[in-house]
């Protein structure tokens, strides 16, 4: 899982050396790391509904890795943006505070921090399962903000961000359906 | 056609030109697709000859000219201009072309002419991007008459000493170096002088993001990003350079806007 999840990093490095990132490598890198973040986050959200739907157990086992990889690529995405702006804190702060497009992305990454920090089994034990679960519901907000960030960042053709938004919606709806069914079955 | 080499002109930048591969391989030209590499991939089918250009509207001597006739009447010269895209990247483009003013003087604008409207080719057969509704087609642009008559304003027919590549707007495109790149309409088929300010494609599509004037201005941010800096394509590494007012042509053009609020007329 981890090897697979880190392949893109190797591909980026290779492409960077061979010039395959194109005429605007920084922009390409920003876009690709952003897309990976969102895709991995949505995959991590699909694990639980998939487990309910199929009865398979492996989705639950890779969920943590998917979430952590999403966080990693999100941090890389932000790091590229920071370096691209020459660590110019004035301009970065202005972006985060004044441009909703940047605000949404920044907030999404901010929400992923506590989740990454409490991703270990030990954290679950320390927080207690109920509290840990409640905290990790932040992932829904992070994913929604991520989709919004992507939607606002696109200049004209909104097809791709809408596809990501639809995927998020399906994953949330199926989760809701399974929870309700679970509850009525328990009754 | 080979292009005569002339010594550096008064408006030429001495910055190193963006290599041909990047200048002709990284383009915004939605008629051929949304990705920057799409135009170079998809523009091959565009027929650039024969090509007719109509110059009409508020003029005393309207013209309908074949582009080769146009080139014989107005021989191209070298102009090395900075190009700043509204998306925050820039290039240095070694154009060949002739001043739009020369053509406009040849048609004698009437005293009522105040603006110049430009229309690009509309042919979904040759321009696959026009089969999508991503923008209203054809692409249209406009300038105030004094902007159009400014000696910096160019009709370009060549790049890097070669005929203009299709993905860069062949056979004939506008170049207005102190404005964001989207003002410099490609594949021009019609130039009309008008009394009223003409519609422009991007200001129709997103009026809060793209205005009629679209002068390069580091102090007026785009709603989604700052315009204070830009990335020069072809330069290695991370980092951006500062964007200059009017893309570095303030000395030549700032007087055109001396009585205007450029925050409102962005």
Image (cartoon, rainbow, N blue to C red):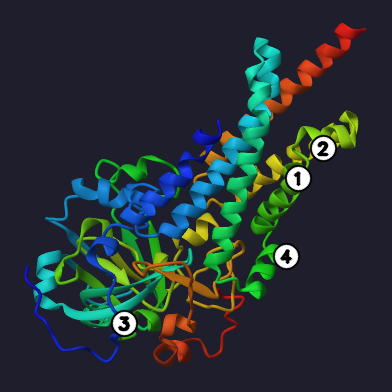
Secondary structure of the residue carrying numbered label 3: loop
Residue A127 drawn at (x, y percent):
89, 37
Instruction: Name the chain under label 3.
Output: B
- Residue B119: quadrant of the picture: bottom left
Residue A64 drawn at (x, y percent):
68, 32
Q: Residue at x 71, y 20 (%)?
A: A174
Q: Please determine if labels 2 and 1 lie on a single subunit.
A: yes
Label 4, residues with CA under 10 Å away: few <14, some 14-19, many ≥20: some
Secondary structure of the residue carrying numbered label 2: helix
Query: Mark 3 and mark 2: span between their CA atoms?
Result: 56 Å
- Residue A85: quadrant of the picture: bottom right
Residue A142 drawn at (x, y percent):
72, 43
Q: What residue is pinned by disc 3?
A: B15
Instruction: Determine which of the numbered discs, if any, sits on residue A97 in the image.
Output: 4
Query: Mark 3 and mark 1: span between their CA atoms?
Result: 48 Å
Q: Please determine if labels 3 and 2 lie on a single subunit.
A: no
Q: Are marks 2 and 1 in contact (CB under 8 Å)?
A: yes
Query: Mark 2 and mark 4: span between their CA atoms?
Result: 32 Å
Label 3, residues with CA under 10 Å away: few <14, some 14-19, many ≥20: few
Query: Mark 2 and mark 1: span between their CA atoms?
Result: 8 Å
Query: Mark 1 and mark 4: span between their CA atoms?
Result: 25 Å
Q: Residue at x 34, y 58 (%)?
A: B27
Left or right: B15 as drawn, with respect to A127: left
Q: Please determine if labels 1 and 4 lie on a single subunit.
A: yes
Q: Are marks 2 and 4 in contact (CB under 8 Å)?
A: no
Q: Residue at x 59, y 64 (%)?
A: A82
Q: Is residue A11 at least partly visible in the picture?
A: yes
Q: What residue is pinned by disc 1?
A: A117
């Amino acid at each position: 899982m981890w090897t697979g999840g880190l392949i893109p990093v190797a591909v980026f490095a290779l492409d960077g050396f061979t010039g395959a990132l194109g005429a605007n490598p920084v922009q390409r890198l920003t876009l690709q790391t952003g897309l990976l973040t969102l895709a991995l986050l949505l995959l991590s959200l699909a694990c639980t509904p998939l487990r309910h739907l199929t009865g398979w157990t492996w989705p639950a086992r890779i969920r943590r890795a998917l979430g952590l990889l999403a966080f990693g690529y999100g941090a890389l995405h932000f790091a590229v943006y920071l370096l691209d702006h020459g660590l110019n804190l004035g301009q970065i702060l202005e972006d985060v505070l004044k441009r909703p497009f940047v605000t949404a992305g920044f907030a999404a990454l901010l929400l992923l921090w506590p989740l990454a920090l409490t991703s270990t089994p030990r954290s679950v034990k320390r927080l207690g399962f109920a509290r840990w679960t409640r905290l990790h519901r932040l992932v829904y907000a992070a994913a929604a903000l991520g989709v919004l960030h992507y939607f606002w960042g696109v200049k004209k053709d909104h097809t791709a961000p809408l596809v990501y938004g639809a995927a998020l919606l399906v994953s949330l709806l199926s989760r809701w359906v399974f929870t309700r069914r679970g509850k009525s079955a328990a009754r | 056609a080979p292009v005569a080499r002339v010594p550096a002109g008064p408006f030429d930048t001495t910055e190193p030109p963006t290599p041909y591969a990047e200048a002709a391989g990284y383009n915004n030209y939605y008629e051929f697709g949304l990705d920057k590499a799409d135009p170079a991939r998809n523009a091959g089918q565009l027929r650039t000859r024969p090509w007719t250009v109509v110059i009409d509207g508020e003029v005393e001597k309207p013209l309908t000219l074949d582009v080769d006739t146009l080139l014989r009447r107005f021989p191209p010269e070298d102009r090395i201009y900075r190009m700043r895209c509204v998306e925050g990247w820039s290039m240095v483009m070694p154009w060949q072309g002739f001043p739009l003013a020369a053509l406009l003087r040849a048609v004698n604008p009437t005293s009522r002419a105040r603006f110049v409207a430009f229309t690009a080719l509309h042919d979904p057969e040759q321009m696959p991007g026009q089969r999508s509704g991503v923008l209203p087609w054809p692409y249209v642009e406009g300038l105030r008459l004094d902007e159009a008559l400014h000696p910096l304003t160019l009709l370009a027919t060549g790049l890097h000493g070669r005929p203009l590549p299709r993905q860069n707007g062949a056979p004939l495109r506008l170049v207005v170096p102190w404005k964001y790149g989207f003002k410099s309409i490609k594949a021009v088929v019609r130039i009309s002088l008008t009394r009223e300010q003409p519609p422009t494609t991007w200001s129709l599509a997103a009026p809060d993001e793209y205005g009629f004037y679209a002068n390069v201005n580091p102090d007026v941010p785009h709603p989604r990003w700052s315009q204070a800096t830009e990335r020069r394509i072809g330069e290695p590494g991370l980092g951006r350079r500062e964007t200059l007012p009017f893309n570095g042509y303030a000395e030549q053009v700032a007087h055109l806007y001396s009585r205007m609020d450029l925050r409102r007329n962005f």
